[in-house]
Image (cartoon, rainbow, N blue to C red):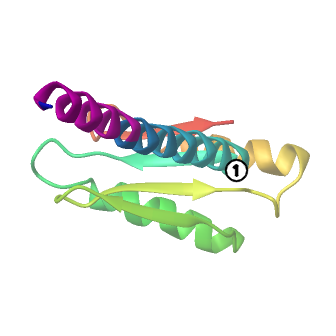
Amino acid sequence: MKNSILILSSAIFLSIASCKTKAKTQTTDSTSKEVAKTCAATVNFASKGAGIDASSYEGVKALIASKKLKFTEKRMGKEGETELCLPLTELKGSEKTDFINQLKKFENADKLVSVSTN
């Protein structure tokens, strides 16, 4: 009797645990693909314990505003770590390349600002 209960409870536990694992994997994969498709350029502001570089952050935001571009902002962490996602659908060809080059001028390893493109 004890063996039957042990086997049955183990089977139920494993089936529940496997269902949760599959759901998380599917969500993570679809989210990663969506982000990769929508962000032509991503600007990350990191921190080493003293917050992000405010002047770089304000400069990037001013550049984005000057071009009237759409973007999403994702706040992470407790020190203001931020990721800006720019689809850049408003810009075409050399205009897009020029804008990305302007963004890269803010890139600075010491200030923990990085720019990546897709």
From the image, which quarter does the C terminus lie in?
top right
Name the image quarter holding residue 3.
top left
Can residue 107 be seen at all in this image of the molecule?
Answer: no
Disc 1 packing (10 Å; few <14; some 14–19; many ≥20) = some
- Write the start and end of the magenta stretch as one range: 2-15
115 and 14: which is toward the camera: 14
13 in the magenta segment: yes
The residue closer to the viewer here, 17 or 2, is 2
Q: Is residue 70 above or below residue 104?
A: below
In reply to whether residue 32 is colored magenta, the answer given is no
Overall secondary structure of the magenta section? helix
Left or right, residue 25 beside residue 99: left
The image shows residue 109 at horizontal and vertical percentages of: 33, 31
Residue type at numbered disc 1: Phe
**Residue found at the very far front of the displayed protein:** 1
* Residue 48 position within the rendered picture, expressed as x and y whole percent measured from the top left: 15, 41
For the point 45% across and 42% down, the residue is 19
The answer to whether residue 44 is above or below residue 91 is: above
The answer to whether one can see residue 9 in this image is: yes
In which image quadrant can residue 10 be found?
top left
